[in-house]
Structures are given as structure tokens and as C-alpha cells.
Image (spheres, rainbow, N blue to C red):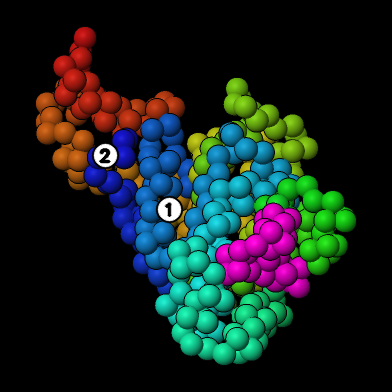
Amino acid sequence: MTDERPFVDPGGLVAFWHEQYLRAYVAEGGSAVKWLAGREGSGKTTVLRELRRVALTEGYLVASVSAREVQIGRFDELYRAILADLPLDGIARLFAAEAARRAGAGDFRPGVDGDLESHLLAQGRPPAAVAADLAGALDFLYEDRNIAAPVATALRHIAAAVLRPGIDQDARRETASTWLAGGKVSATERRRAGIGMVLDRYGAREVLRSLLYANRLAGGKGLLVTIDDVDALLGGDGPVRYTPLRRDDAFEAMRELIDEGATMPGLFVLFAGRPAIFSDERLGLRSYPALAMRVEPEVRSSRPNPYEDLRDLDDIWRQDWPAWRAKLLAAYGSAGHETVESQALFAMGPISPVKLLVEAIQAKEAGTYGA
């Protein structure tokens, strides 16, 4: 499915998550970890992309990770994968804008209007008052006890560098940004920046929690993280290889995300992968009972439950397939030829009928169908 085509929402899945979670439960401070299964071509990646798009329109921070491309082992590795896709410059501007608002310069645009000091002086404020306002502009980061002091200090450095650019600020911003992203920072550099915390597998949980609280304090909605290709944990030819130990580390990190949910306000994590990762008794989630019991529904119904943590795209498409097939035909081409539609017959196999139908439509449009 290409980006230029209209999005066909299977079973209204994205619309449901948008309304019930991004606009309601998660936006109000809740957290959710969801799972999406589906055969090749069932639309998992497209669903994730569309969910990220609507999350951005709602004011969420958004990160996209592929378990096939990036190691997601221990919690700190998962944290680094998430932070690698987050725009720290955008986060800096978010906190700088909140600081400017609290200093009485709500019209100040961080990164656009120069430095806040000149902006405040141009308003006719006395220099002494401006100095006092600047000194306390970012103190709000220390107001919430749920924000660890090292995280508040790091955020202060990256935001201060936007408010008052300078060599000293830039050096501290570099240290703070590298540390927040989980990069290597020497003890000396951390000490100079006032950041004492080591970002290991335990510290990473505290930093992520603090970032979520700080984001809400600055007016942000929350953080959406989509993690695709989790079936890579089973092995394969991808650039990242998972040993049994690494796989168990990843399953444990997933469990921790679920269990820490009550202390992670505004976090929505969506994992997606092919069915084997959920059904394989030897290598999949079921091989790690502490995670499997938190993911698999206790009661199964003949109709999909939109609130279940684990959703199966193949089951969703199968429900009322004629209607979904018509929508796919309308979105991907006007071809109504019965031989094209026959490509979508549900048969056993690793390929989703959605992919078969779309490829048949595209081949017919290109004049290569049946060639």
C-alpha cells in the first residue's frame, strides 16, 4: 500500500484507537500497550503509519522503531531505540515555549525570534527584571516530584540553549542531549552538567517516566511509540540478530512497559508483527509466560473486541470481507474484474489476501496482470 493511496481503516481500528485512547484515555494521563498481529501484506505497517499521523495532529511526540533494524533487548536498549527517533530539538522548543509563557512572553517563538532576553528587553522590561525572569524561567521543571532531578536538569540545559544561545549553553546542551538519548557521556561530563544518573536498564525506566511527566507539564499530550517487525525476534536474515538471551531481554522489557503503565502517563506503545511471534510456543511470546499472560485475552469471542490488547488484522479483514474488499477496490483502483477479486480469496498461507488483491489491482492498472 503506497502513501499516495487513500487509507482503508480495517474495522475502524485506527479511528477507535484515535478516539478512545489518543483523544481520551491516554490524553487524560492513562497509558496503553497494544499488539497487532497479521500476515504479510495485511496492512500492519500502514496502520502504524496512519496512527502516527493522527497522533501528530493531536500534539503527541511520535517515535517509530523496527525490531528488524534496531536492537530492542534490555529496557535501556528499547529506550535508546525510541529516543533515536524523537526530535530533541522539538522537545527543546516545547520546554522553551513553556518557559517563555511563564515569563510573560507567550508570543515568543523559540528558535525563530532569537533569544528570550532580547525579546523581553524589547518589551521595555527593566534589565534587572529580565535577569530575574530568565533565572527562574525553567524552574517549573523541578515542580513535579515525578520528574527526576537529573532529567529536569538535562531538559533545562537543552531548553536554555534555545532561549539564550551561547557557547556555554551549547556545550551543556550537547552533554544533556547525548545523555537523554542514551549515548555515552563520561562521569566528568555528567558532573559538569549536573547530571548524576547513569542511564542503565533501571535508570532508563526512570528517565522515560520523567520525560512523560515533563512533557505533560509543558503542555504536551503524550508519546506514541510504534514498534514494527517484532517477529524479527524469532530470527531471520535482518541486520539485527537476536540470541535467546536477547530475545528474553526484549520480552522482559515489554513486560516492564506493561507493568510500569500506571507510572507512565500519556504513553501509548503499539507492537506489530506476523502471527508466529504470538503463536510460536518455543520462541514467541508464549515462551515467556510472564509476558504472554499479560498479552493474550482471557476470554475469546467470535467478534473482535476493540478494547483487547491483542488485535488480529486477519480476523478483522475476515469479518465482513465483501465490504472491505469493495473499499480496497475503490481505494486502489476501479478494477472490478472477477479474476482480480478472486486473488483475495481467503486461503491458507503466509500472504494476506489484502496484499494479493492490491497487487492484482496494481498489475491490472499497469497492464501487466496475467502476463
Name the residue rendered at 42%, 73% in the picture.
24
Say if the magenta span includes residue 56.
no
Left or right: 218 in relation to 173:
left
Residue found farthest to the right: 188
Query: Does residue 363 sit above or below 86 in this rendering?
Result: above
**Quarter of image, res 361:** top left
User: Residue at (55%, 57%) from the top-left corner?
Assistant: 89
Task: Using residue 97 as the reference point, say whether residue 206 is left or right of it.
Answer: right
Query: For the residue marked with disc 1, what is the amino acid?
Result: Arg
Would you name the residue on which mark 1 appears? 52
Front residue (pair 265, 305): 265
Judged by its main secondary structure, the magenta piece is: helix
User: Which quarter of the picture shows residue 207?
Assistant: bottom right
Image point (81%, 67%), residue name: 194
Q: Looking at numbered disc 2 in the image, what kind of residue is underneath it? A: Glu
**Which contiguous range is marked in magenta?**
148-177
Percent across and percent down for residue 246 are: 74, 38
- Circle 2 sits on which residue? 4
How many residues crowd mark 2 within 10 Å: few (<14), some (14–19), many (20+)?
few
Rendered view: 65 above or below 255: above
Judge the density around disc 1: few (<14), some (14-19), many (≥20) Cα neighbours within 10 Å: many
Q: Residue 364 appears at what percent x and percent y?
A: 17, 21
Confirm whether residue 69 shows in the render: yes
| In-front residue for pair 177/316 | 177
Q: In the picture, which quadrant includes the N terminus?
A: top left
